Image (spheres, rainbow, N blue to C red):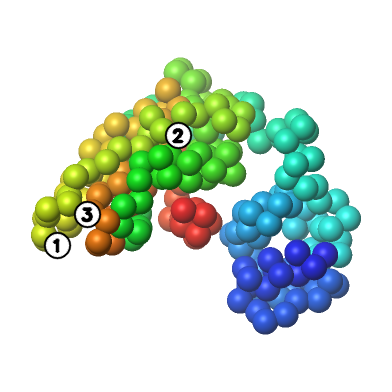
Amino acid sequence: ERVLCAVFAEVLGLKRVGVEDGFFELGGDSISSMQLASRARRAGLVVTPRQVFEEKTPEGIAAVVRRTDEARTAVDIGVGDVPWTPVMRASGERAARPGFAQWVVLAVPGGLGADILAAGLSAVLDTHDMLRARTVPGEARFTVGERGSVDAASLVSRVDAVRAGAETVRELTERAAGDAAGRLDPVSGAMVRAVWVDTGPERVGQLVFVAHHLVVDGVSWRVLVPDL
């Protein structure tokens, strides 16, 4: 309950939350419920947005929550077949084209390292099930793999910008985003790609995170960016 109260307060921007305080009464919504689930996992608790809607309070959620070490042995309810939404069906096969993507550019520490980036991306993929989805040719559905089923390292690339000036770094970053979007492949499960624009150990670098529009929209970034 103490952990959940702290997570409630963090997500909602409050100084203090009591065990009987309702998430939505405090100003939460469907998107922040996903943020709550993500932050709770970082704290070692497995909470689903549905549990937040049903239980509402730290006290209620604590009664049904599991710890992450317990969840590792449980059946992953986020895997398997997922039907396309009506909007996806209306778009048809065009919705699965490689360049149909959105991306975000984030500042990262100098000398980040591809290994560290791959490990971080792996954690994000394991947390957000739909990022592990793949399309099924000729069928209006996804297949979502288990945690660990996507090789995060294969989705990470590096752009050398160590000797580049600020304007060149900007151009390299824009080009990297377009190139990464074109290399997305929903059929093979490459729904995301991460490009590290390496400006050297003494300067802030850039992380370009590209995701296919089948698995993200404008609202999704409110959940994904804090995890990144």
- Residue position marked by numbered label 1 in the rendering: 166
Which quarter of the picture shows residue 85? top right
- The disc, 3 or 1, on the residue closer to the chain's N-terminal end is 1
Q: Which residue lies furthest to the front in this view?
A: 201
- Nearest the camera: 131 or 66? 66
- The disc, 2 or 3, on the residue closer to the chain's N-terminal end is 2
Q: Is residue 202 left or right of residue 72?
A: left
Q: Position of residue 3 (x, y in %)?
A: 75, 64
Q: Which amino acid does label 3 sit on?
A: Thr
Badge 2 element: helix
Point out the frontmost of discs 2 and 3: 3
Residues at circles 3 and 1 in contact by the CB criterion of under 8 Å: no
Q: How far apart are marks 2 and 1 (CA)?
A: 29 Å
- Residue position marked by numbered label 2 in the rendering: 152
- Residue position marked by numbered label 3 in the rendering: 199
Q: In this view, does 145 lie above or below 35?
A: above
Q: How far apart are marks 2 and 3 (CA)?
A: 22 Å
- The disc, 2 or 1, on the residue closer to the chain's N-terminal end is 2
Mark identifier at residue 178: none
- Nearest the camera: 52 or 2? 2
Q: Which amino acid does label 2 sit on?
A: Ala
Badge 3 element: loop
Q: Residue at x 68, y 66 (%)?
A: 7
Crowd around label 3: few <14 · some 14–19 · many ≥20 (10 Å): many
Residues at circles 2 and 1 in contact by the CB criterion of under 8 Å: no
Q: In this view, does 221 lie above or below 98?
A: below
Q: Position of residue 91 (x, y in %)?
A: 40, 35
Q: Which residue is drawn at 17% across and 57% down?
A: 170
Q: Is residue 187 above or below residue 170?
A: above
Q: Which residue is drawn at 26% across and 45% down?
A: 177
Badge 1 element: helix
